[in-house]
Image (cartoon, rainbow, N blue to C red):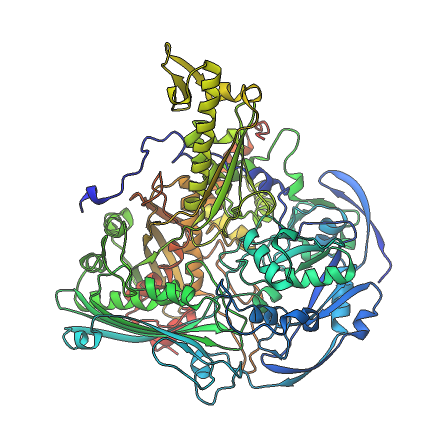
Amino acid sequence: MAAKTRVCVKINGEQLEFLCEPRQSLLECLRDILGLTGSKEGCNDGNCGACSVLLNERVVNSCLVLGVEVDGQEVTTVEGLADWRGLHPLQQAFLDHAALQCGYCTPGILIASKALLDREPNPSEDRIRTWLAGNLCRCTGYDKIIRAVQDAVGRIAQPREEVKR
Amino acid sequence: MSKDKRSTPEVTDYEVVGTRPQRHDAPDKVTGRALFGADTNLTGMLCGKMVRSPHAHARIRSIHTARAASYPGVYAVVTAQDFWWAKDRGTNPDESGETIKYLHENMLAQEKVLYVGHPVAAVAANSPHIAEEAAKLIEVQYEVLPAVTDVREAMKPDAPLLHEHLVTQSLSKPVQKPSNIGSHFQNLKGNPTQSFSQADLVVEREFTTSTVHQGYIEPHACTVWWTVDGDLKVWTSTQGAFGMRDQLAKLLSLPMSNIHVIPLEVGGAFGGKLPIYIFLEAVAALLSRKASRPVKMTMTRAEVFLATNPTSGAYMKVKMGATREGRITAVQAELYFEAGAYPSADVIGYLGFATAYMFAPYEIPHGQIDAYDVVVNKPRTAAYRAPGVPQANFPVEQLIDEMAVRLAMDPIEFRLQNVVREGSELLNGTTHGNIGAEEVLRAAQSSNHYRTPLAGPNRGRGVAQGYWGNWGARSSCTISVNGDGTANLVTGSVDLSGTRTTIAMQAAEVLGISPDRIQSNVGDTDSIGYTEMSGGSRTTFATGIAAITAARDVIAQMRGRAALLWGVEVQDVTFERGIFVTRRSGEKQMFFAEVAGKIAETGGAVTGTGNVDPQGWGGAFGMHIVDVQVDPETGKVDILRYTAVQDVGKAIHPSFVEGQIQGGAVQGIGWGLYEGYQYDTRGDMLNPGFLDYKIPTATDVPMIETILVEVPGPNHPFGVRGVGEVPIIPPPAALANAIYRATGVRVADLPMTPVQVLEAMGVI
């Protein structure tokens, strides 16, 4: 086993540090070291998007980033979307539109969608579909996901709803 | 069609059914809190890793594990030797139809490996990386044998034999000589040979479909702990906790009561995580016992493709005849389905569905179907959403379209002329019950999509329909009433897509309370009665009936409590729309919550129970309409518009029903246009990853329009029909029919990739 490296990183707004082996991916570090199991492994080769996280506001497949690479960076995972005001408007839109079935791809799709809406406040259907092409969903056929993202556009300007449960 | 023949649901003015409340588990799933198969973490937990065969067909000469076992960080190594009690198990199926010997051999190969990825050993270590390194230290010597991956090749007399002693199970003629044909059966109705000679029009073609995978995004994963006191705890992603428990009891020779299966959230399954075939859990159990530690095993994506349970590729010859007025006179079909490495456990199941449902939409006086289950050097095949039917539907719906074209008839009108009704006899001798076949065709015909003309070069519109018979089976539900008028509901049905809510909604309808007053839970095998797996489109129907039964039990008990409080007899208390009423001595009323508030002082807990095994469920039809544009230079097929029409009985939660239809349709589109296992000549899979095994992305499909037809299903208080499987059936044929109308050529082989389309067009 290789010597472990200390990594200092801001995750979901919280500055923290952990030790990891150089060969461990960011996804492994999040799930196995930090206990943030919201990001999912679907392929471990960058083709499904279930492990999508934001690295300094850019969407990355966390299975393709090494843990040691995020030293000094900022990472946002699905666990960082909701806050004391309640769910993120995208999360609420996904509930209202039944935009998930098994829920396994959902964390990655929420993260990718957030990155899109952070950049482009009012994307077209085509733009949303192209942006989400790297996030596979096997349950929904994408229809309700696209509608939820479209609907979230209008909600982001609104004040957040209270936590429902 | 006379409406009076329909079974009338017991309730028609609903408070809850048909609304769209928020899903009970959705907040967990959008915040990352939901725990799936790989999310279990226990103190001292090890990671297990399989060692897999690099050969498609080989005899195992020796396995040396010493180097791996002494590698630092390794706690246990197992091979088939560790299943020592499995050796004497014969090849006869047990009462569940499964051959335990094959299950054992598929988990850890004994004498031979039969596909690339076949496990031969497993290790457990204190990190996944160390387990991987140790797995590479296990030395296996193979005698490589010739492999066969195509059903037609596998049936040739000189084909390499996968199982030296396999003789064909056949009802018609006894077979003695070993072959790769596991079984053969036949459905026969009337006299098809004579009837074909009297037909004005006969169409006949050969078709093939590829091996395809369910493609769930969550790889198989479990954590197993064989404790020192002999109990087995299993946290896993499965479609059926009880089925998993029972199979483990047989595989490990343990009492059922010692096995505690805790079902986790399932990241997609579609028949690929049925508890019938076990890949990891029993091996993890062996590792755990040896190591005296809990062991987690997860698959990589490549392992999922190589070594789980894709569904059969098929070779099919189908022939249909009709009169010039457009009445089908006779059909004949030969189906050759891949079983993969072992003969299908439940051959009558998968091929039985294919043969029963392929012609089910049509009134057919004469027909013959011969079905063959053929072993090949591929992973063992299993169910994928409407198992067997999309393959067999693909030829039928193309030939129906071909006949309509040749008779110059509208394709829906042609189908209407031959539509089945209640009492129509299928080729397997069963008859249709209460069905909505005609209603679906009429709804498709009058849809905005079908009535809007499609214009433009290289464009075409195709239609196809499909049928799935649905399922009932055992379900268990308990409802416990709380003092504040809320309730906690537990069922044994693993929730694949929102059934916590559709089940709670049915209970809420009976209890007269809002569904968000019910906490809806999936129980483990220690906390609820036996419940069959979530599959076969049974859950909202059968577990719904269990919940309705439990809710009625709750009401009966609470009427007693109200009677006690009022000092009247229980028969003097009625329950009307959420309110307990007595008129015994002046009218008095109490709300559900008021009686709930008094249960502590009227005898203690109120827990309703529903243990059911409902029969007489209704099957369902769906028709899909698709517009495509085919690029004549590249052969690429673009979908312009897509509509799915389906009889859903009664949609408990319409958004979820739409979601089932949309998701199924897009899986069917993937099956039709993109997906297929590819092999080299040595039997090595060329595309075991999502880069090369392409499933539809958001850019490949348009919005999927849905039209829900509600012909109440029989033998359910609200008229529920299963909805999940029908929508995967029609897409391949609907796309093929659209491609024909765009290009003038028929594509008979799936997937209809650009290359296939160009070849059919004669361009290459």
Relative image position of residue B136 (x, y in whole percent):
74, 72
Instruction: Confirm whether residue B662 shows in the render.
Output: yes
Instruction: Confirm whether residue B299 shows in the render.
Output: no
Relative image position of residue B164 (x, y in whole percent):
53, 84
**Residue B28 to residue B678: above or below:** above
Please tell me which residue is depicted at 60% across the width and 52% down the height of the picture.
A50
Please tell me which residue is depicted at 56% across the width and 74% down the height of the picture.
B90
**Residue B381 to residue B493: above or below:** below
Please tell me which residue is depicted at 33% across the width and 44% down the height of the picture.
B715
Tell which of B271 and B617 is nearer to you.
B617
Q: How many marks?
A: 0
**Residue B77 to residue A47: above or below:** below
Farthest left residue in view: B325
Tell which of A39 and B436 is nearer to you.
B436
Tell which of B9 and A143 is nearer to you.
B9
**Residue B644 to residue B689: above or below:** above
Q: Quadrant of residue B329?
A: bottom left
Please tell me which residue is depicted at 61% across the width and 72% down the height of the picture.
B117
Tell which of B531 and B764 is nearer to you.
B531
Farthest bottom residue in view: B158
